[in-house]
Amino acid sequence: MDSYFYHYLFIGIFVLATVGFAVLPLALAGFIRPRKPSLLKQAPYECGVEPVGDPWIQFRVQYYLVALAFVIFDVETIYLYPWAVGFHELGLPGFVEMIIFLAILAAGLLYAWKKKALEWD
């Protein structure tokens, strides 16, 4: 067998196994589960409390903006930790790249601040 094809065969087997591990339990649960629909089972569950009002309410856009800012700065810390661990090995180019990265994020924060996207009315 050709060595080139041999390597891709293992990748293909790995992909099939991965998809199988994801799909097989879902398909098996779909066949095994009991089918007894009722109004109580289809009702939304609110921690044991009976739901009051319409579940499709609109939230203010500030909630989403604050959540988006949180995600952005959370991702920033994901990149800061490995950089801090390998700071000595990266040298000056790594330091300059991280300063540029932080400057871009700071510019985005200043833009959101100037647009008053983070203020509550």
Image: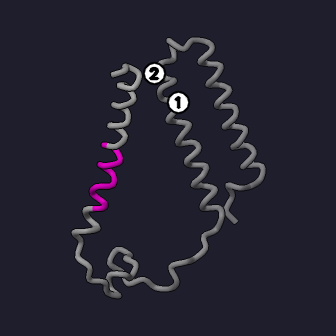
Can you give x and y, in whole percent of width and height, for residue 70 in the image?
56, 49
In this rendering, the answer to whether 46 lies above or below 88 is: below
Residue 80 image label: 1
- Mark 1 vs 2, N-terminal side: 1
> What type is the residue that disc 1 sits on?
Leu
Examine the image and state in which quarter residue 37 appears. Answer: bottom left
- Residue numbers of the magenta segment: 17-27
In this rendering, the answer to whether 13 lies above or below 19 is: above
Looking at the picture, tell me which residue is in the foreground, 72 or 109. 72
The residue wearing badge 2 is 85
At x 57%, y 42%, the residue is: 73
In this rendering, the answer to whether 20 lies above or below 4 is: below
At x 75%, y 45%, the residue is: 111
Estimate how packed mark 2 is, as few (under 14), some (14 to 19) or many (20 or more) residues with alpha carbons within 10 Å.
few
Left or right: residue 63 compared with residue 18: right
> What type is the residue that disc 2 sits on?
Val
Looking at the rendered structure, the secondary structure element under dot 2 is: helix
